[in-house]
Image: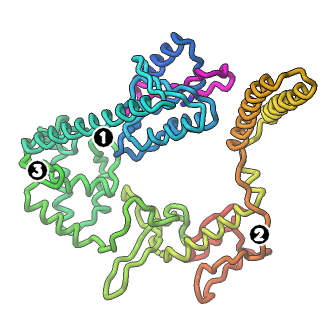
Amino acid sequence: MSDIAPTSPRGAWNTAIYARLSRDRRGLSENVSIQVRECRDYADENTWPVVGSFPDNDISASKYSKKPREHYDLLLRAIKQGQVNIILITEMPRLYRRLEELLELIKLAETTKLQRIQTTNGISYNLDSADGIHAAINAVNNAMLEAARLSKRIKRKQKARAIEGKVHGGGRPFGYEAGGLVIRESEARVVRECARRFIAGESIGDITRDLNKRGVVTATGKQWRIENLQRTIMKKRNIGVREYEGQEYPAEWPAILTREQWGRMEAQRLSKQWRWPKTQTGVRKYLLTGFIYCGRCGSRMYSGGRGPECGRPSQRRYRCRPHDNYGNTSGCSKTFRIAEPVELLVTQAVWHVFDDPKVAVFLSPKVDEDKVRHLVQEFERRKGKLDQLVTDYATDVLSRDQFIQAKGIAEASVQEAREALSHYQSETALAHVQQHRRSGTRGRPRAWSGGATSCAWWSTGSSSTPGDPVRSAGMATTSIPRR
């Protein structure tokens, strides 16, 4: 967690420490804390006040990483608020491996108090000089080049191991002992049984439910889930094949199933797979899955689309599922609802609730009145000193040169106090919904076209208001907080 010290002495050497570790699978690495200690020792040796430390653990800085660097973003915020003169790191790759991010920092240095990037081995990158900027860009370019070379070396090694049929690594695969080279016969029998039953036409859900009922567990000792069981028995490792980037190579471990068995399972899987139109991956397709309930049995409803058949297009639907992901009985399987009108109705209900300023007040964090009062008083005190300078100059207490010099210092002090107050307010204020937008029905579209189903619960006095979900037979419902 970032550690901000707002009471640290202000000066031209205010230092922010940044540390980062690319990969920490167990979350136990001391690498980040070691980097922070090394930077603190360096700052102490140079008598630089440390105004904050910003460690990002288990986060890559490469162009391939999509995981946000939370504390790096906090560092940028501190820079924009004028709190940082120096960024202290152990080496440049800890801070950047993407040139576009460095260019953003260089732009910030033009408009903030940031002066340079400093490493603990004595290398300084002055961001207010052409030579310093050139050196920083070269350092990041070198880091990018080394990362690309490292990636190629790793890929070459992985491909060579794949061609030789060697184990890729990872946890113990189901059906094999640790190391993945020796068959564990007790689990191999389960794989063969599941393959035989699936080929015979039994559903993965039924097989999953049976395994869990019998107490057969996964390689990690957990209950089977439907998707995990299908993925496990369909692995080509089970037929002695090592896969790498779409290519197949003979593996060094023995097979549990034959290629013929795997082929028949794949044919069975494809015969049950719905041919849905391709959509963008990584996008939530069902807004309310798991959040709405069956009006018959009260169970949660999940996505249950219908595939195209007999010239009829595919359709997104919610359904009450008969079994959960473990194959256990969960619902009545008698309720289906088309997704679009349900999602539209709930979306409008949520906007209706959050359109009330009382909700914004309720959700907003409590303001520390004493801190606000102190920040306001400090701002007024500094502004008063600036006003006093004008009087001193007018009464010849200060010369013109003295007034100009003192005025510059005082204005900077006032601006610093103004930014501190603005920063605190921006962190505690919640955007309130504008009252003038509330008028009548505000143009709410009907959830169902043609008026077959009314949105009567929007009206005052309706018996079916949000917060009182109707659970009549066959009606999918959702609970919306009452305003």
Look at the image and say whether residue 14 sits in the magenta stretch: yes
What SS does tag 1 mark?
loop
Q: Amino acid at mark 3?
A: Val
Q: What's the amino acid at mark 1?
A: Thr
- Foreground: disc 1 or disc 3: 3
Residue located 20% across and 40% down the image: 152
Q: Residue at x 58, y 21 (%)?
A: 13
Report the front residue among 402 and 449: 402
Q: 285 and 473: which one is in front?
A: 285
Mark-to-mark CA distance, 1 and 3: 23 Å
Question: x, y percentage for residue 469?
Answer: 65, 68
Rendered position, 311 above or below 222: below
Task: Please provide percent x and percent y for residue 424.
Answer: 71, 38
Between disc 2 and disc 1, whose residue precedes?
Answer: 1
| Display coloring | rainbow
479 in relation to 97, above or below? below
Circle on res. 438:
2
Main SS class of the magenta portion in the image: loop
Q: Mark number for residue 248? A: none
Task: Give the residue furthest to the top.
Answer: 45
**Disc 1 marks which residue?**
220
**Badge 1 vs badge 3, beta-carbon distance below 8 Å:** no
Which residue is depicted at the point 71% across and 32% down?
A: 416
Seen in the picture, residue 47 relative to 354 is either above or below; the reply is above
The answer to whether residue 346 shows anywhere in this view is yes
Labelled disc at residue 241? 3
| Residue 322 image-quadrant placement | bottom left
Q: Which corner quadrant holds the C terminus?
A: bottom right
Kindly report the distance in space between the C-alpha atoms of the residues bearing marks 2 and 1: 55 Å
Q: Position of residue 262 (x, y in %)?
A: 13, 60
